[in-house]
Image: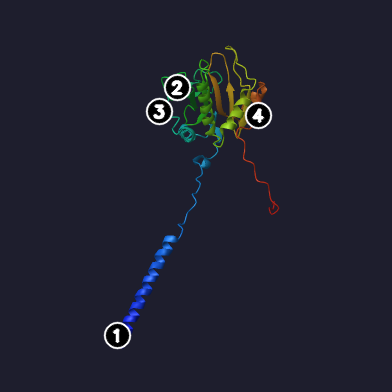
Amino acid sequence: MDHRRRWATLALALALGAGLAGCGSAQESETAEPTQTEPVAQAPEWAAWSPVETGETARGEVCFALSAQELIRRCNVRWAKAWGEDLLPPLDQWMAYGVGTLSRRGGVEGRQYQSLQDPNNYAEPFLSLCLAREEDRVLEVVTGLSQKNYTGAPTTLFQAKSLCALQAFFPDLTEADFAALYEALSQNARYAETWETPLPARVAWQDGVACYLLLQIGEYDQFHIRPADPALLAQWRAAGVEVTEGICPKSPQPNPTEGDVTP
């Protein structure tokens, strides 16, 4: 009987020990704080975009090394970030005007396309593309504002489309940056007479990209984006156009610390 009591006592002690251990584990699991992971900030899609370079077409025209499809994609990415929807449809849904200057003086000659969000509203500010005749290369991007609609909304939409088009080339350009740029480009600008060849009051350029306003009586107010080589810049300067460098403010570079070594 003694040995049976000893085995029973040992079994009871083991059972109690196991129960206490189990309760302790459960209590620890209930009181332990859950592990939290900090959300990882995702870089915007345009942070990976390559800068747009300039080149020449087979005809010797200065062009952007950018296809219509890529420009449309970039514009839609930036527009959707601000407005939650695409701005531009595929190119085959644009109004095609054939080869010419789209009845605009001062524009580049090439295959002309125009896009409106409402195809039945010709008073809506437009965005147009000029492409090389035989190649899918952008020669120029133009936004236009009808002079018959000087109410606030069309003007705001015109500038919003101009900003979006310019963000395809300078994706970090902000609304504040563009507002300052637009004010500088339009300062003291005058409307050319109907018989005059319109010239921009001033041109801003950076990394081979030039932008400017063209104003002429009877024509749309136009915001142009086109590739600029030294010859074109010299041509503008010779005509008395003020040419300034700088479109998108560049991020300041960090100051070197004492531990930095300059090679």
Query: What residue is drawn where x is 54% and y is 26%?
Result: 159
Per the image, label 1 sits on a secondary structure element best described as helix
Q: Rate crowding at label 3 as few (under 14), some (14 to 19) or many (20 or more) other CA atoms within 10 Å.
A: few
- CA distance for labels 2 and 3: 13 Å
Q: Name the residue type under label 2.
A: Gly
Per the image, label 3 sits on a secondary structure element best described as helix
Give the mark, 2 or 4, whose residue is nearer the N terminus: 2
- CA distance for labels 4 and 3: 36 Å
Q: From where the camera sits, is residue 58 visible?
A: no
What's the mark number on residue 244? 4
- CA distance for labels 1 and 4: 103 Å
Q: Determine contact: label 2, label 1, CB under 8 Å.
A: no
Residue under numbered circle 2: 98
Give the mark, 2 or 3, whose residue is nearer the N terminus: 3
Q: Position of residue 97 (x, y in %)?
A: 45, 21
Location of residue 236 (image quadrant): top right
Q: Determine contact: label 2, label 4, CB under 8 Å.
A: no
- CA distance for labels 2 and 4: 33 Å
Residue under numbered circle 3: 92
Please state which of the two labelled residues, at mark 2 or mark 1, is closer to the viewer. Answer: 1
Q: Name the residue type under label 4.
A: Thr
Give the mark, 2 or 1, whose residue is nearer the N terminus: 1
Residue in the foreground of this view, choosing between 4 and 166: 4
Per the image, label 2 sits on a secondary structure element best described as strand
User: Does 85 appear above or below 95?
Assistant: below
Q: Determine contact: label 1, label 3, CB under 8 Å.
A: no
